[in-house]
């Protein structure tokens, strides 16, 4: 499926295509093509040649009305890629036009993808559409997360206007689509909604085929242990959403405790699922 974004007013257009292939030494290498202000830093191999780390960079520093960003990932069988960002993705206030970002990843049998960007910030008055689609074939697996911060509470900038639409999709297993309106106090502040929390965190482990029961239970139990030890113990939970997907969700007042929890669970899941020690990208420590 080719990523297609709706027409938008004049703005930045950025497209990044990354194709991960098996290198001559049996590791993972990558080819990239980019158009406009969207690219990656050099390939990094802090774990050796098997795992390619990439940092996605958007030099303008934020996404405004009329901007369209497209990211397309293709992972050949047996490859492993970890992608992150050097800072938050920021959707700024719009004068009316829609800001759009779309990711489509196609992961072949035996390949592993880690989609681990830093947080997304929805500013007051933004009009944003953020869509992520992960096509996992039989034998492919991934760990991914998404952290959304509504407004800048610490700076006194509430998310009290604008709209943020987000869609997460693993075809055939999981489809989640939500629209958050800054004027919807019932959703934002009700105990049955976000209860005044302005940070929403989601972490998932997904596979192209059913996750064996004992393996899934071990992953769930490790996540619950991390939740119990975190500052968000009362506001987080993990479930087996589908036979192919495990999902952790958390609400928080600030980004830091949410990101700390996700990193703790990721650190537990990596060795359990793939027999790999956690290797945090350097940009997480800067």
Image: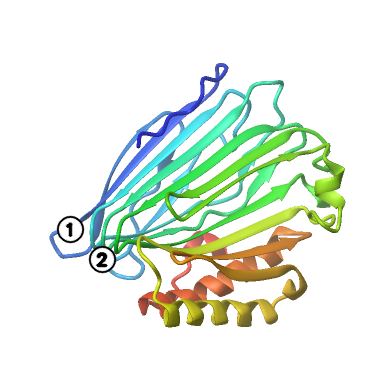
Task: Relative to 122, say whether 231 is above or below.
Answer: below
Residue appearing at x 77%, y 73% in the figure: 234
Task: Relative to 96, say whether 149 is above or below.
Answer: below
Where residue 130 sits in the image (x, y, percent)?
A: 57, 39
Along the line of sight, which residue is nearer the eye, 134 or 18? Answer: 134
Question: In the rendered image, which quarter contains the C terminus?
Answer: bottom right
Along the line of sight, which residue is nearer the eye, 168 or 40? Answer: 168
Would you say residue 59 is visible in this rendering? no
Task: Relative to 114, say whether 85 is above or below.
Answer: above
Along the line of sight, which residue is nearer the eye, 170 or 98? Answer: 170
Residue 72 found in image quarter: top left
Circle 2 is placed at which residue position? Answer: 49
- Number of on-image labels: 2
- How far apart are the alpha carbons under marks 1 and 2? 9 Å
Where residue 34 sits in the image (x, y, percent)?
A: 36, 34
Residue appearing at x 59%, y 70% in the figure: 239
Which residue is at the far top? 10
Identify the mark at residue 166; answer none if there is no mark: none
The image's colour scheme reads rainbow
Where residue 92 sits in the image (x, y, percent)?
A: 68, 34
Question: In the rendered image, which quarter contains the N terminus?
Answer: top left
Residue appearing at x 30%, y 60% in the figure: 138
Q: Along the horizontal axis of the image, is 244 left or right of 19?
A: right
Q: Along the horizontal axis of the image, is 165 left or right of 6?
A: right
Q: Along the horizontal axis of the image, is 204 left or right of 225?
A: left
Q: Secondary structure at mark 1?
A: loop
Q: Secondary structure at mark 2?
A: loop
Which residue is at the far left? 24
- Using a 10 Å C-alpha cutoff, classify the residue at mark 1 as few (fewer than 14 neighbours), some (14 to 19) or many (20 or more): few
- Using a 10 Å C-alpha cutoff, classify the residue at mark 2 as few (fewer than 14 neighbours), some (14 to 19) or many (20 or more): some
Whether label 1 touches label 2, CB < 8 Å: yes
Circle 1 is placed at which residue position? Answer: 23
């Amino acid at each position: 499926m080719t990523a297609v974004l709706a027409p938008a007013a004049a703005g930045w257009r950025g497209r990044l295509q990354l194709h991960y292939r098996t290198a001559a030494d049996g590791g993972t290498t990558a080819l990239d093509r980019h158009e406009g202000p969207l690219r990656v830093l050099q390939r990094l191999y802090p774990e050796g040649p098997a795992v390619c780390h990439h940092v996605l960079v958007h030099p303008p520093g934020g996404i405004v009305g009329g901007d369209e960003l497209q990211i397309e990932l293709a992972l050949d069988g047996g490859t492993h890629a970890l992608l992150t960002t050097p800072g938050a993705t920021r959707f700024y206030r719009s004068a009316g036009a829609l800001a759009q970002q779309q990711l489509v990843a196609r992961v072949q049998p035996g390949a592993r993808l880690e989609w681990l960007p830093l947080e997304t910030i929805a500013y007051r008055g933004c009009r944003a559409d953020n869509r992520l689609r992960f096509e996992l074939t039989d034998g492919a697996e991934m760990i991914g997360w998404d952290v959304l911060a509504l407004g800048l509470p610490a700076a006194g900038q509430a998310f009290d206007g604008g709209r943020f639409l987000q869609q997460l999709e693993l075809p055939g297993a999981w489809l989640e689509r939500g629209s958050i309106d800054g004027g919807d106090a019932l959703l934002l502040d009700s105990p049955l909604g976000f209860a005044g929390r302005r940070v929403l965190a989601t972490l998932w482990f997904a596979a192209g085929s059913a996750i064996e029961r004992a393996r899934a239970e071990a992953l769930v139990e490790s996540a619950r242990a991390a939740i119990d030890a975190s500052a968000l113990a009362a506001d987080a939970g993990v479930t087996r959403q589908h036979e192919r997907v495990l999902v952790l969700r958390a609400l928080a007042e600030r980004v830091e405790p949410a990101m700390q929890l996700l990193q703790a669970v990721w650190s537990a899941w990596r060795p359990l699922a793939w027999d790999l020690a956690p290797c945090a990208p350097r940009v997480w420590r800067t």
